């Protein structure tokens, strides 16, 4: 999928409304002032006398709310033939889009927030699910076998790099243009620091993925968060590494890699998690398996001791 970025003030408006939106607070004076000014201008534009459409003036609140976040998901993103899963991932309020490429000929992005969440942007991945037997991967499976997913990722990242023009510049497209399949000729400001290029990002992925993501945005995400689909929303290409496309097989009991004793595949990279929390939980499970292997009857048993015990048993 892609990483979509909105002004944080827009997300505050969607999530908190006009009454509470102005109270979103991060502690950075310039960012908080941008948010307050945005809501002040909205109030002035709504009515010449400063009143809302219902005749009541916006309520003034003195509380402080954290900058807002969101989570979106649907399992009914129609790709033209069937429904796919589509969802937001790793939402970063007050965040920044950062490079995640591992090769100069590939373009891949990710997102992050500093601890204070004090930037003027909010970003999240918008992704579509692909199953191991997905028709989208047919050509890749035929050529690359079990590594089809990895090669698919690389191919999409290479396409994005070419479209961006190289040197880690990434292609971008207004979300409104993406759903209408119109190449963007301009772009709002972006937190990505290595450069962006307005591009036809809808041409990067296979059509079933593009269609399902368009359907998710228009018919599901916009209904869940009215205002999410707007001119200021900017997608960045591409986000392809939300989860590992391969899994290192491990014994279900010992959790050690099949054929490699002492190696414990775990977390996202090994294919056993799909996010920070699930990776942490898998790490706890694997840690217990490691302890079970190291301890016998409450005592630490070294690998040398185990080898000696095995030899003693074989002699007996």
Image (cartoon, rainbow, N blue to C red):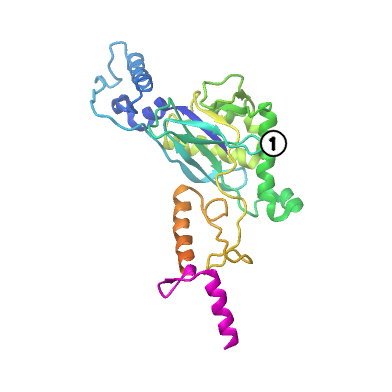
Q: Between residues 194 and 148, which one lies in front from this camera angle?
A: 194
Residue 62 screen position, x and y as percent: 23, 25
Within 10 angstroms of label 1, few (less than 14), some, or many (20 or more) residues? many
Image coordinates of residue 219 in percent, x first then y, are 50, 37
SS state under label 1: helix
Q: Is residue 301 on the magenta stretch?
A: yes
Residue beneath the point at 64% across and 28% down: 200
- Depth check, front residue: 87 or 216: 87
**Left or right: where 101 falls relative to 72:** right
In the image, residue 300 lies in the stretch drawn in magenta? yes
Q: Residue furthest top?
A: 48
User: Can you say whether 74 is above or below 251 in the image?
Assistant: above
Quadrant where the image shows the C terminus:
bottom right
Q: Is residue 65 left or right of residue 266?
A: left
Establish if 165 lies above or below 127. Answer: above
Specify whether residue 136 is in view. no
To which quarter of the image does residue 95 belong?
Answer: top left
Q: Which residue lies most toward the right here?
A: 143
Give, as a single range, the part of the protein colored magenta.
293-316
Residue that carries the numbered disc 1 in the rendered image: 158
Front residue of this view, candidates 90 and 193: 193
Q: x, y percentage for residue 34?
A: 38, 19
Q: Main secondary structure of the magenta part?
A: helix
Which residue occupies 66% across, 27% down? 167
Asked whether residue 170 appears in the rendered view, the answer is yes
What is the total number of numbered labels drawn onto the structure image? 1
Q: Say which quadrant the N terminus sits in.
A: top right
* Residue occupying the point 47% across, 41% down: 90
């Amino acid at each position: 999928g892609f990483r979509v970025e909105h002004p944080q003030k827009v997300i505050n408006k969607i999530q908190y409304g006009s009454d509470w939106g102005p109270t979103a607070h991060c502690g950075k004076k310039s960012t908080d002032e941008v948010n307050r000014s945005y809501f002040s201008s909205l109030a002035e534009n709504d009515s010449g006398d400063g009143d809302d459409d219902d005749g009541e003036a916006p309520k003034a609140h003195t509380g402080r709310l954290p900058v807002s976040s969101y989570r979106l998901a649907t399992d009914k993103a129609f790709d033209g033939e069937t429904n796919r899963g589509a969802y937001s991932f790793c939402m970063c309020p007050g965040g920044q889009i950062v490079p995640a490429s591992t090769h100069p000929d590939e373009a891949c992005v990710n997102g992050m927030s500093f601890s204070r969440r004090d930037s003027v942007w909010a970003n999240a991945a918008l992704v579509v699910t692909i199953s191991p037997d997905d028709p989208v991967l047919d050509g890749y499976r035929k050529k690359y076998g079990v590594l089809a997913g990895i090669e698919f990722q690389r191919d999409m990242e290479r396409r994005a790099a070419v479209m961006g023009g190289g040197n880690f510049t990434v292609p971008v497209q207004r979300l409104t243009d993406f759903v209408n399949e119109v190449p963007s000729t301009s772009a709002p400001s972006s937190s990505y620091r290595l450069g962006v290029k307005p591009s036809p990002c809808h041409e990067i992925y296979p059509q079933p993925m593009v269609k399902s993501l368009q359907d998710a945005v228009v018919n599901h995400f916009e209904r869940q968060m009215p205002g999410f689909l707007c001119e200021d929303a900017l997608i960045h290409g591409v986000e392809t590494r939300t989860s590992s496309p391969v899994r290192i097989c491990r014994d279900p009991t010992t959790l050690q890699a099949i054929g490699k004793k002492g190696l414990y595949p775990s977390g996202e990279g090994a294919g056993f998690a799909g996010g920070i929390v699930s990776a942490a939980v898998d790490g706890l499970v694997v840690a217990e398996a490691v302890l079970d292997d190291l301890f016998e009857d409450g005592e630490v048993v070294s690998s040398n001791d185990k080898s000696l015990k095995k030899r003693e048993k074989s002699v007996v």
